[in-house]
């Protein structure tokens, strides 16, 4: 029977349970396949703090070296630190992390030189095919002149690059609580924040890939609870939470209330437009708040709407020359960071904005929080297409309502909208709704759910 890696090679990365679904021998094949598909003479490799990461990362590097590729190992790093290395060194890169997944998981996020994404349509399918082929026939013989493996420190350079993009030297002193969730934020935050006018209160900075305190997924409200309590208890100005590989950041205000990623997107978009003379394209996915395109237009920019997912965002960033992009999931993309996502740079923008004025964060972000949203609501359905057709039938032809199919189905009126998207991997429909007020949002949310769950 032919090897099948479909369970672990996803749309954007490799992800699976170690050692049940993949191990060092397979990591070596992925390294060899990455070398073949990119055609690179040199690559850079980094890893997070999961117990399995160092050995998997080294096996990948050896697999690439056996194909004649010189491998620079940067060791422990955040995902955006790996993107920095890929951009600064102009090398393809591989990051060993399973982001926010539980401890038994691990994965690989891969990119071409300059942090350009590798996904199903940009090399990942070919990498999978080669690895499957070699699983059946055996790994290829090493080339006559293997590549070298060398190590390099990049943390200080990464931190300096980020600080060069946001001026924090003249802000008022701020007290900030940071929850690293035992992930890579505990490694990067002390160096990035060093020398800034910040009093840092660290939470769970000990690198521990078993995640003893809570899952490193701040998108789940349960994992923000500790931070929400600690910020007011410390009398801090704000709190910041990072996910496991520290490429996403979540913000809570001085009261411990979460700030929506859409509000952060709008705030950073305004700042990036100001840095670029009030001109530029700003990318947002179709389930970010309507606040985002409104703020972009108000400050001279051009909003561009995309499907959900980082490959779509990065492709549109490159196509349009956009200066910034944001997603509802707290991924933030910057032209000055090779169009890659970096939660740390977004966090620095929030600190600069807050420290550049005297009011509290809750007041600052209120101007970017103009609507009421439902958050994402998942429903298990037997037939995704049939339920989407039922929604279309219910709303099509109603006065003042528009429908579009950019990503799932979006139904919109003057003061509300909702989007329903099918999951690619599960029998789920995902609903996001937004309206001018709570009562309207509740009404249209419940109407849509009734059709979805009928």
Image: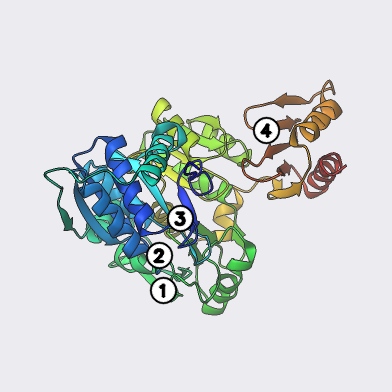
Q: Is residue 270 left or right of residue 44?
A: right
Alpha-carbon span between mark 3 and mark 2 = 16 Å
Q: Nearer the viewer, mark 3 or mark 2?
A: 2
- Check disc 3: other Cα within 10 Å, few if <14, some if 14-19, many if 20+: many
Q: Is residue 451 left or right of residue 249?
A: right
Query: Residue 205 shows which numbered tag?
Result: 1
Task: Name the residue: 63% across, 63% down.
Answer: 221
Reading the image, the residue beneath label 2 is 185
Check if mark 2's residue and mark 1's residue have beta carbons within 8 Å: yes
Q: Earlier in the sequence, mark 4 or mark 1?
A: 1
Reading the image, the residue beneath label 3 is 350
Q: Earlier in the sequence, mark 3 or mark 1?
A: 1
Image quarter (top left, top right, bottom left or bottom right) of the C terminus: top right
- Residue pushed farthest bottom? 233
Reading the image, the residue beneath label 4 is 408
Q: Nearer the viewer, mark 4 or mark 2?
A: 4
Residue at disc 1, secondary structure: loop
- Residue pushed farthest top? 397
Instruction: State how many labels appear.
Output: 4
> Whole-percent x and y of residue 265?
52, 45
């Amino acid at each position: 029977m032919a090897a099948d890696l479909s369970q672990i090679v996803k749309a954007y990365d490799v992800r699976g349970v170690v050692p049940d679904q993949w191990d060092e021998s397979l990591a070596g094949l992925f390294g060899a396949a990455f070398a073949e598909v990119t055609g690179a003479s040199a690559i850079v490799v980094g890893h997070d703090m999961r117990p399995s990461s160092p050995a998997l990362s080294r096996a990948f590097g050896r697999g690439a070296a056996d194909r004649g590729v010189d491998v620079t190992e940067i060791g422990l790093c955040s995902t955006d630190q790996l993107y920095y290395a890929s951009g600064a060194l102009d090398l393809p890169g591989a990051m060993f992390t399973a982001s926010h997944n539980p401890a038994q998981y691990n994965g690989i996020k891969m990119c071409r030189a300059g942090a350009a994404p590798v996904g199903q349509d940009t090399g990942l399918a070919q990498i999978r095919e080669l690895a499957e082929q070699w699983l059946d026939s055996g790994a290829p013989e090493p080339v006559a002149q293997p590549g070298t493996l060398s190590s390099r420190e990049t943390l200080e350079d990464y931190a300096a690059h980020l600080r060069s993009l946001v001026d924090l030297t003249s802000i008022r002193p701020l007290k900030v609580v940071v929850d690293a969730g035992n992930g890579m934020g505990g490694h990067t935050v002390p160096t990035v924040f060093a020398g800034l006018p910040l009093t840092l209160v660290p939470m769970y900075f000990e690198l521990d890939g078993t995640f003893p305190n809570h899952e490193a997924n701040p998108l789940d409200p349960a994992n923000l609870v500790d931070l929400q309590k600690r910020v007011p208890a410390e009398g801090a100005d704000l709190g910041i939470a990072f996910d496991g590989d520290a490429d996403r950041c979540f913000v809570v205000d001085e009261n411990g209330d979460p700030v929506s990623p859409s509000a952060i997107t709008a705030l950073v978009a305004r700042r990036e437009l100001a840095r670029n003379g009030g001109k530029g394209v700003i990318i947002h996915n179709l389930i970010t708040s309507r606040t985002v395109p409104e703020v972009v237009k108000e400050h001279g920019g051009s909003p561009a709407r995309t499907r959900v997912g980082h490959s779509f965002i990065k492709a549109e960033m490159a196509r349009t020359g956009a200066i910034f992009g944001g997603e509802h999931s707290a991924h933030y993309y910057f032209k000055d960071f090779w169009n890659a996502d970096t939660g740390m740079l977004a966090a620095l923008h929030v600190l600069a904005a807050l420290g550049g004025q005297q009011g509290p964060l809750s007041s600052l972000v209120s101007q970017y929080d103009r609507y009421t949203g439902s958050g994402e609501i998942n429903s298990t359905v037997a037939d995704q297409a049939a339920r989407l057709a039922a929604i279309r039938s219910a709303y099509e032809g109603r006065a003042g309502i528009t429908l579009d199919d950019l990503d799932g189905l979006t139904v919109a009126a003057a003061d509300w909208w909702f989007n329903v998207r099918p999951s690619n991997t599960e029998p789920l429909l995902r609903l996001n709704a937004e309206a001018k007020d709570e009562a309207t949002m509740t009404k249209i949310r419940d109407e849509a759910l009734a059709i979805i769950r009928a």
